[in-house]
Image (cartoon, helix red, strand yellow):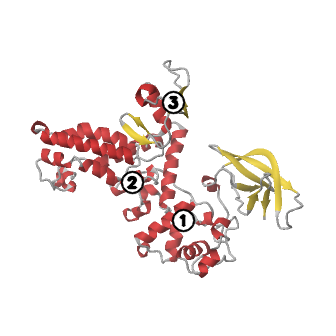
Amino acid sequence: MLSLATVVVVVIWASPASIFGFGGAQEGPFSAALGNGLEQKATVIKEYDYDEEFKHLGYSASLLGGSSTATAGMLKIVRRAASVFQRKPSLRHCGASIMTSVLRPKLVYALTFAKTPASVVDALEGAFGVVLRNSLSVAKGFPWDVLAGSPEYEGLGYSRLTTEVTKGRLRLFQSMAVSKFATENDLGRAMTHLAQRWAGSSTPVNMMHVDDLRLLLPLDGSAPQSAHMFHELRSLGYSLAVGWRCEPLACGDATIYDALLDAAGGDDVSMTDDELASFQVWRRAAKVMWVSELLCADGRTLRSRFDRDLQRRVRNCEVEALQLCMVAFGHGRTRPARRRRVGIPKPALWTVLEVGDLLWRNNTVCEITLKNTDSACVRVRDTFFDLTASSTVYAFAGHDTSTIPYADTPLRIDTATTDSQGVVHVS
């Protein structure tokens, strides 16, 4: 999906009032200015409510990030075009040329920036399939594999729409990967990072085996766009040579998926598609990938948000609770062992820390307030004597600020609460 910021800059040059037709709507928070002499003053674009849609070069995209309405509209147009061409004998035998030179470029432009799964792309292409087959003088049910096959293997050499969309997404990713601007490089790295965490495997997402592509499912609107691209590339047999990958967050760390497979004997065949889908839903909802993300800084005890009511669920033999214990504590264990499950944290932990997380640094508690390119801004809280707290609880307060470079290893605090006065209590 084309980012909203990009859409705004493109359409302002072409008179947003005439293109969008947003008369009578409330003002939105989006504005842009051009410094090329055509427009020197910042222009505020008016927009409808967020459940409405805007149009960009004939493609309707939801502000919420979905594209079902847009693809339905494109499918309707393609079907209408196919019906028109099929009724005109003079155009009936030009289907392949019309598809490749007219319809396909228009569809590829829109689908490249959308999270449209391959099934929807195939439906768009299939709507024009009858005209295409007639123009190639083959039967109505002629298989797509032969149509798209290489001529040297007795194929007809037709390039599928899914392949062209994948090429467009790959060109966009490559332009960011080789850009001379560090910001675009970071964007490409972030796309790879998102796809890797979506899959949950330690194998780089751009080098995954074809049999492991089910880790990227489901490829719907909730999946990162980069997950769509890498899945399509690996399905076609292509490996993308980039050096970006998700690094372990602690010494001796392992992914939750790999730890679960090791406990099951190292064979993922024993995990059915339904079991894998259920596991992935839980993992993605919890926003975790590595075993260290389940554990506190001591590397052995569960973080509080995973430890709630765990023992009762274990006694009831709930599958998710038993799997969590197996991954966090080791095979056959339901409680932490004396030895650490993972080692000390690494600087890579910064990649999963968010604004609001608490860190321990130089006998103070630091709250992350902003994450920059190479450092994080934190609010520093020193020791505070709270007479109302118990002897095992330590209080911290203060409003000093500081920065922590990403080269420093962070130490996350999981046993802390913040009251209404901004005082942090660590137990």
Most foreground residue, 411 or 347:
411
Label 3, residues with CA under 10 Å away: few <14, some 14-19, many ≥20: some
> Quadrant location of the C terminus?
bottom right
Residue 132, above or below 207? above
Q: Determine the residue positioned at 25% across, 36% down.
A: 102
Type of the residue with mark 2: Ser
Q: Determine the residue positioned at 51% across, 53% down.
A: 194
Most foreground residue, 11 or 251:
11
- Compared across the picture, whether 22 is left or right of 109 comes to right
Residue that carries the numbered disc 1 in the rendered image: 255
Type of the residue with mark 1: Thr
Find the residue positioned furthest to the front: 24
Of badges 3 and 1, the one in the foreground is 3
Type of the residue with mark 3: Ile
Which element is circle 3 on? strand
- Is any atom of residue 227 visible in this view? yes
Residue 45 tag number: 3
Give me the C-alpha separation between circle 3 and circle 1.
45 Å
Label 2, residues with CA under 10 Å away: few <14, some 14-19, many ≥20: some
> Quadrant location of the N terminus?
top left
Q: Are marks 2 and 3 in contact (CB under 8 Å)?
A: no
